[in-house]
Image (tube, rainbow, N blue to C red):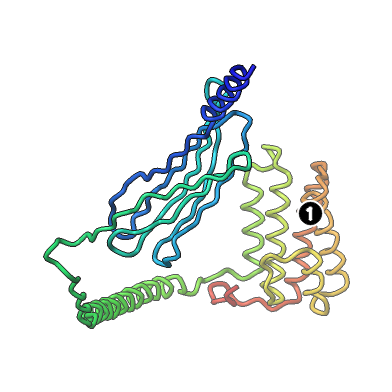
């Protein structure tokens, strides 16, 4: 019985020793330049169900920076797992640097491991003790003289262009002035009473009515009447409506003349704007009405002798 008890205790001891966690601490580099960021790695191999906790006792040196902690776990064969803690170390002093230690607690039992020392070396050659201070860049005033030259050339070009524009403008105005003088030569017109009859005869000789263009015929007939009244009573007849013509002849034409003029323009407006198509007898009657207007007005209005210059309209 005593031997069995001893064997059982020994077996449990061996099993406990076999299940002790395996802890390793390493650095990606053990020698680096000042300011380099080195990654430290703590690996713990333990039972799959064990609880693993980490605590880092950092160096108290303020020139050594430790941070960026990350941990992860993954399953291993034979009901084991691997827990890895990584963090970064950055030293800003030369020489051998103590980084501290790692405390690992597995199922409440605590283990301590020192973080390997880090050798920080200078990036300068061995014979170079210090860095020569950089000389400040000499203060150089910017040269804007080329801008002054460009501005001067630009001003000269603008002056030349302005002169050319002025000369061309004057030349065009001079040429236009000559053309206007040629065009402004007074036109010798027939007296209104003679001109209107010539215009009516010219209209009647056209083929408007034969071609069925009744509206075009009455438009031109209406304009002939407006021109005659405008020249006789001396008002601007261009672009005037029938109503405006009535207003302009008020007090200048007699009552019977106004009645004839009104009847004439009413027929013309019906054809021009109301699409009224008159019979041939109505067309003849309207033309005769215009002749009657002309005869009535010309009997009482003094007309200049043929060949004299009339008022330019």
Residue 242 horizontal side relative to residue 134, left or right? right
Quadrant of the rendering where the N terminus is positioned: top right
Residue nearer the viewer, 193 or 207: 207
Above or below, 141 against 185 in this view is: below
Above or below, 130 against 155 in this view is: above
Q: Position of residue 138 (x, y in %)?
A: 20, 80
| Quadrant of res 161 | bottom left
Q: Residue at x 45, y 47 (%)?
A: 113
Q: How many marks?
A: 1
Q: Position of residue 112 (x, y in %)?
A: 49, 48
Above or below, 1 against 305 in this view is: above
Q: Position of residue 213 (x, y in %)?
A: 70, 42
Residue nearer the viewer, 153 or 52: 52
Label 1, residues with CA under 10 Å away: few <14, some 14-19, many ≥20? many
Quadrant of the rendering where the C terminus is positioned: bottom right
Q: Residue at x 57, y 75 (%)?
A: 312
Above or below, 121 against 83 in this view is: below
Can you name the residue that lies furthest to the front here? 2
Name the secondary structure under disc 1.
helix
Residue 194 horizontal side relative to residue 159, left or right? right
Q: Position of residue 189 (x, y in %)?
A: 55, 70
Q: Residue at x 42, y 47 (%)?
A: 40
Can you name the residue that lies furthest to the left here? 127
Residue nearer the viewer, 147 or 257: 147
| Residue at the spot of label 1 | 268
């Amino acid at each position: 019985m005593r031997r069995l008890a001893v064997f059982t205790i020994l077996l449990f001891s061996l099993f406990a020793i076999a299940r002790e966690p395996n802890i390793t601490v390493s650095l990606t580099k053990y020698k680096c330049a000042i300011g380099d960021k080195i990654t430290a790695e703590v690996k713990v191999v333990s039972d799959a169900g064990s609880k693993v906790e980490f605590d880092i006792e950092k160096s108290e040196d303020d020139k050594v920076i430790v941070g960026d902690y990350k941990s992860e776990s993954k399953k291993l064969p034979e009901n084991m797992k691997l827990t890895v803690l990584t963090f970064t170390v950055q030293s800003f002093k030369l020489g051998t640097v103590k980084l501290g230690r790692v405390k690992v607690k597995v199922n409440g039992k605590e283990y301590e491991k020192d973080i390997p020392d880090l050798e920080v070396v200078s990036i300068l050659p061995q014979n170079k003790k210090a860095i020569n201070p950089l000389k400040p860049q000499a203060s150089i005033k910017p040269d804007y003289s080329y801008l002054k030259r460009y501005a001067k050339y630009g001003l000269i070009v603008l002056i030349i262009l302005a002169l050319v524009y002025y000369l061309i403008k004057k030349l065009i105005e001079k040429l236009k002035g000559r053309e206007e003088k040629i065009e402004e030569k007074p036109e010798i017109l027939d007296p209104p009473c003679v001109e209107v009859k010539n215009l009516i005869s010219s209209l009647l000789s056209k083929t408007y009515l034969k071609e069925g263009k009744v509206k075009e015929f009455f438009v031109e007939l209406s304009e002939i009447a407006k021109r005659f009244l405008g020249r006789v009573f001396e008002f601007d007849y261009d672009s005037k409506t029938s109503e405006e013509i009535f207003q302009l002849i008020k007090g200048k034409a007699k009552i019977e003349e106004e009645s004839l003029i009104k009847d004439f323009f009413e027929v013309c407006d019906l054809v021009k704007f109301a699409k009224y198509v008159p019979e041939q007898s109505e067309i003849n009657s309207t033309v005769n009405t215009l002749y009657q207007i002309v005869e009535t007005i010309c009997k009482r209005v003094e007309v200049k002798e043929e060949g004299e210059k009339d008022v330019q309209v």
